[in-house]
Image (cartoon, helix red, strand yellow):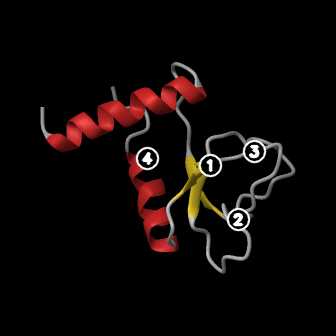
Amino acid sequence: MSALSAARTAARRDLLSVLGAGARTEWRTCFSTDGSEEPTGVAPVCPDEGHEEDDGSVYVCCPEPVIEADSHTMAAYLAALLNADRGAS
């Protein structure tokens, strides 16, 4: 198993322990720290109908985990990776 495959397997296991088995969570960038100009974190897409898709804020209705990535470019990359891995076994 490659290092990338091992990392994906471990991350998937960790995320499923938080999100629940069988979760096919879609990810988004979010504002995970106060005062940042760009979204520097990632979080699952909020299922609440009142939460607009382009709103990067995190509210009490939003599912966890919120993962801080420290930069908006890294957050976008991490969200893209997590979404690419959705449904992978």
How far is mark 4 from mark 3, CA to CA? 17 Å
Q: Which residue is mark 1?
A: 66
Q: Looking at the picture, which amino acid does disc 3 mark?
A: Cys
Of marks 2 and 3, the one in the foreground: 3
| Mark positioned earlier in the residue sequence (2 or 3) | 2
Secondary structure of the residue carrying tag 1 is loop
Q: Which residue is mark 4?
A: 82
Q: Looking at the picture, which amino acid does disc 2 mark?
A: Asp
| Mark positioned earlier in the residue sequence (2 or 1) | 2
Compared to 43, does 14 lie above or below?
Answer: above
Q: Residue at x 62, y 76 (%)?
A: 38
Secondary structure of the residue carrying tag 2 is loop
Of marks 1 and 3, the one in the foreground: 1
Q: Residue furthest left?
A: 1
Secondary structure of the residue carrying tag 3 is loop
Q: Which residue is mark 3?
A: 62
Of marks 2 and 1, the one in the foreground: 1
Of marks 1 and 4, the one in the foreground: 1
Cβ atoms under marks 2 and 3 closer than 8 Å: no
How far is mark 2 from mark 3, CA to CA? 14 Å
Q: Residue at x 43, y 56 (%)?
A: 78
Residue 54: which disc? Answer: 2
- Packing grade of label 3 (10 A; few <14, some 14-19, many >=20) is some
Residue 51 image point, x, y percent: 81, 53
- Packing grade of label 1 (10 A; few <14, some 14-19, many >=20) is some
Residue 22 image point, x, y percent: 51, 21
Is residue 28 something that shows in the picture?
A: no
Q: Looking at the picture, which amino acid does disc 4 mark?
A: Leu
Q: Looking at the picture, which amino acid does disc 1 mark?
A: Val
Compared to 53, does 8 lie above or below?
Answer: above
Residue 81 image point, x, y percent: 39, 52
Cβ atoms under marks 1 and 3 closer than 8 Å: yes
